Amino acid sequence: MDVNIYGATMPHLLADEGLGFSTGLAGTIGSWTTFGMLIGALTAGTLTDWLGRKPLVTASVLLFSLGSALCAVAPGAALFGAGRFVSGLGLGGLMPIGLAIVAEFAPPRRAALATGLMMTSYHAGGMAATGLGLALAPDHGWRLVFWAGVLPAVIAVPLVLKWLPESPGVLFAKGRTQEAYAVADRYGLDRPGTAQAPEASAKGRMSAIGALFAPGTRWATPLLWTASFAGLLLVYGVSTWLPELMRATGYSLSSSVTFLMVINAGGIVGMLIAGRTADRFGPVKVSAVWFLLTACGTFVLRAEMPLGAAYTVVFLTGIWLFSAQVMVYAATARVYAPRERATGLGWVTGIGRTGAVVGPTLGGVVLAGGNAGLGFTTFAVAAVLGAVAIGAVPLVSGRRRDPEPDAAAALLASDGRPSQS
């Protein structure tokens, strides 16, 4: 919701003369948010093994709520931009930690489905932001919409502090062995040992980063970064420019805006389908196939077709596009051992954020030439790049031989099926 509130209130921000917004400045501030998310993802993914999952989740929620409050009270564009940057730090930090928690606590045969279920909330939040913008901003002003972004600090943080379990591996690394065993027993997890426990020190944090390039993962790491880059380029590029691309293809303004709602609805359905399919066949295969189907869908949209057919293609493309990226995260959770998983997810999501910056810019450059077909072709090429990158991961990843491997870490070589070793 907080990510999408900015777009949902954009017409009202531009119309507020006291705020001093221009179209160019609005785009720059949008980039500040994405830059904050990149820093937040890299930082939180590295620090969470030292400070713990629960404190970092709490800090992330408080940060993006604080950022929303700064936007709500901002007298001008400078403080508003600072608020969006602070929001980005919290939003970027929350993603890899949430993914790491799901990977750790979900039943191994349902880990991809759990990841998909978690990520449906992104699209639900985006639709909620649109609803808030339509319901509140015209009569009550855009500031009230940003005040709604403060609610997580009031509602979610107390629930997180009371109910969110800490990682047994992190507790074990901190020497809180009995607490670690109690959490593991309560949630039906294997009791942690030294193989699952991250090193809770500065040296340990550097070791976790270095382990991303250890034998068995040194080639998988850049491939995962590339797949995440391509996936987020598609997510943000298509989300930003789909209405304009459809208008340039020949559809009306109202229909073009509706396409954005349709593709997000497809995204929710896609998370559920991809999660269940990945638990059976493995997230690497599903992500690669979904990227290729995304390439087909975006390429087909180059041609003007009857409105009903266009809605169908956009809906199907939404099913594949968003969940292709999420299955990259599910695959990442299986590539790295438990002690490096949060760091690995942090860097995959952080590096991927560069794609979130490039996607809207690239779409704008292509669309400025007036060729919608070239725009769709560009996104199709990015999808093929994502398919090649994620599809190559099993070819370069060695089988892990941790003395105490957990179920998720043992799945990579078989791409989602339990190994026989």
Image (cartoon, grey):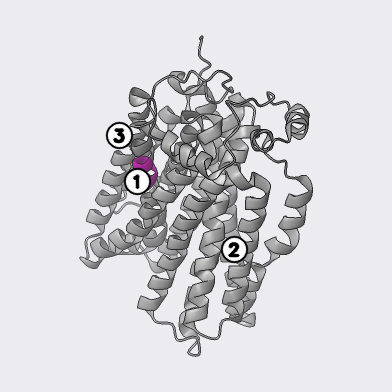
* Kind of residue indicated by mark 1: Ala
Q: Is residue 148 left or right of residue 178?
A: left
How far is mark 1 from mark 3, CA to CA?
10 Å
Q: Which of 123 and 392 is in front in this view?
A: 392
Per the image, label 3 sits on a secondary structure element best described as: helix
Q: Nearer the viewer, residue 113 or 401?
A: 401
Residue 244 x %, y %: 35, 64
Please rate how many residues cluster around mark 2, counting C-alpha atoms within 10 Å: few if below 14, some from 14 to 19, many from 20.
many
Check residue 230 in the rendering and tell me which mark sits there, or answer none: 1
Check residue 64 in the rendering and tell me which mark sits there, or answer none: 2
Please rate how many residues cluster around mark 3, counting C-alpha atoms within 10 Å: few if below 14, some from 14 to 19, many from 20.
some
Task: Examine the residues drawn in magenta and state their main secondary structure.
Answer: helix
Residue 289 x %, y %: 38, 32
> Are discs 1 and 3 less than 8 Å apart at CB?
no
The mark tally for this picture is: 3
* Kind of residue indicated by mark 3: Val
Check residue 388 in the rendering and tell me which mark sits there, or answer none: 3
